[in-house]
Structures are given as C-alpha cells and as structure tokens.
C-alpha cells in the first residue's frame, strides 16, 4: 500500500491571517501535521501544496516534498480541496509513480495524532480502498435544529425530532476536517472526498477534532498546548 499524504497550505486567510505559519507550542502550525504523518509505513511521501514561498521554505526545512508553488488559479477562495488534490496527485503520479491513495491532512487540525492516521489507513486497507473521512459526534443534533420561515421558527428536519429526549437521539456525526483518504480513481471520478459512501474514522478526542479557522479557535489551541506543558512539568 502506497499513500501520498498531501498538506494543502494556501497563504490567504481572511479570518485568521497567516494561520499556517502561526507559532503553536513554539513551532509553525503546519509542522504539527508534518510530524504526525512522518514515520507511517504506508505513506510514501508527504507533499505540501502552497502558493507561498515562506510556507514552502518552512516545509522544505521540515524535510517534506515541495516541488512547486501552486498555480494562481488554485490559490483563490473559489479553488476547492478536490482541485488542489487532483493537481498534486496528477503531478506526483506522472513524476514519481502511481499510488493507492491520497491522504489529505489539513494543517488546521494540529492535534491529529499519528495513531489516528494509522487507524484511518487501516480502515482504508480493510475496506478495499473505499474513501475514509474523519468525523466526530456532533453536539448540536440535526433533529433539534430549527430554521426561519417568515417570522417563525420551524423544525429544520420535518417530523417530531424536537420531542425526542436527548438520550433517545440516534448518534449523529459531523466531518471534522482532520482526515480524508481516497483512491486516485475515486478522486478523479467525483467532486468531493465524500461523493460516495465513506467509511467513518470516528475521532473521539475533542482536541484532535479541533479545526482552527478563527482567532477564537487558535486561542483554544494555545490553551490546549499550555495545559499539555503544565501536565508534563
């Protein structure tokens, strides 16, 4: 099994400028994901796709593959993760050889562990290269969600879900952004990492599920790091 790990790191971020290089626990946030992916036998290479020379330099110093700067059309707000992944995969398979899977590791999930990555890879192998996606149990259950219709609130999902006791609600999950693993053929065939039935990689740790997209999220991450340091003292 050969898997290419791809870490996408665009320079532009309106809600949290420079987030990929922000120091978290004394190292750039993107380095957390690089370190988590290293040393996993099935991962043949770690490739960073970025449009920023500073991010590229940091990642090269971390000894991962940064073969080019991302084309301008893939560095916009409208470029999708699938577009970026296809570009990287096409280049890698043309220049370095074919792989069995592409693993997308967003740098905004710094607390994702090596053990979780191994678990996801094992699911990919067990289920014969069906897509695997990281999920967490949601705290805001969809059966209790509401929407506005004119001046009123009505159930977002029709039915009597609002009358269901919390302990009787079926488990519901949300994609947490920490892990996407897909075969090259499925990536090329669809417009999403979850366009067909996906195998859930259930992440129970709230720290691992943290997706840093705002200054508030980053403040939470800094608190997590501080607590870890205090526990190590």
Image (tube, grey):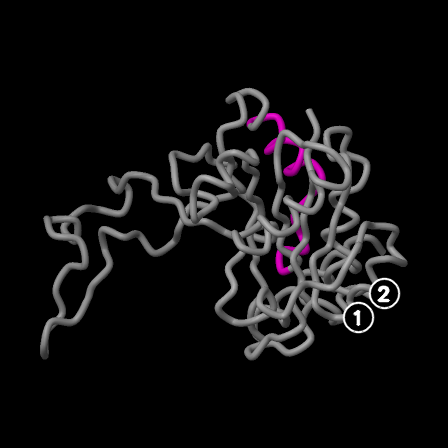
> Percent x, y for residue 76?
56, 71
Identify the residue shown where x is 61% and y is 47%. 104
In percent of width and height, residue 7 lies at 68, 53
Q: CA distance from mark 2 to mark 1?
A: 6 Å
Residue for point 34% across, 56% down: 140
CB-based contact (under 8 Å), mark 2 and mark 1: yes
Segment tinted magenta in the rendering: 108-123
Residue drawn at (16%, 71%) of the image: 148
Task: Bin the neighbour count of mark 1 within 10 Å (Cα to Cα): few under 14, some 14-19, many 20 and up.
Answer: few
Q: From the top left corner, tell me how far across and down residue 135 is, in percent.
A: 48, 44
Query: From what the image shows, is residue 125 above or below residue 20?
Result: above
Kindly identify the residue that appears in the image at 38 percent across and 53 percent down: 139
In magenta segment, residue 109: yes
Q: Between residues 196 and 76, which one lies in front from this camera angle? A: 76
Q: Position of residue 94 (x, y in %)?
A: 71, 40
Of all residues shown, which one is farthest toward the front? 94
Figure disc tally? 2
Q: Secondary structure at mark 1?
A: helix
Q: Callout 2: few (<14), some (14-19), or many (20+) C-alpha neighbours within 10 Å?
A: few
Secondary structure mostly seen in the magenta stretch = helix
Q: Is residue 159 above or below residue 21?
A: above
Residue 21 located within the stretch drawn in magenta: no
Say the numbered circle drawn on residue 22: none
Label 2 secondary element? helix
Quarter of the figure with the N terminus: top right
Circle 2 sits on which residue? 57
Q: Quadrant of residue 115?
A: top right
Tag on residue 53?
Answer: 1
């Amino acid at each position: 099994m050969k898997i290419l790990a791809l870490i996408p790191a665009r320079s532009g971020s309106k809600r949290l400028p420079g987030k990929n290089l922000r120091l978290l626990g004394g190292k750039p946030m993107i380095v957390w994901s690089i370190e988590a992916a290293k040393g996993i036998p099935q991962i043949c290479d770690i490739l960073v796709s970025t449009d920023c020379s500073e991010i590229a330099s940091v990642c090269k110093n971390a000894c991962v593959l940064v073969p080019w700067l991302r084309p301008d059309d893939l560095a916009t707000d409208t470029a999708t993760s699938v577009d970026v992944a296809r570009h990287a995969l096409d280049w890698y398979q043309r220049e370095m050889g074919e792989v069995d899977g592409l693993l997308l590791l967003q740098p905004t999930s710094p607390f994702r562990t090596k053990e979780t990555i191994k678990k996801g890879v094992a699911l990919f192998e067990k289920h014969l290269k069906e897509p695997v996606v990281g999920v967490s149990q949601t705290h805001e259950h969809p059966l209790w969600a509401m929407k506005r219709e004119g001046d009123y609130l009505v159930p977002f999902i029709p039915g009597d879900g609002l009358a269901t006791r919390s302990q009787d609600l079926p488990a519901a999950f949300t994609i947490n952004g920490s892990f996407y693993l897909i075969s090259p053929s499925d990536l090329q065939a669809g417009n999403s990492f979850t366009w067909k039935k996906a195998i859930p990689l259930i992440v129970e740790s709230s720290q691992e599920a943290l997706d840093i997209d705002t200054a508030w999220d980053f403040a939470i991450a800094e608190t997590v790091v501080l607590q870890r340091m205090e526990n190590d003292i």
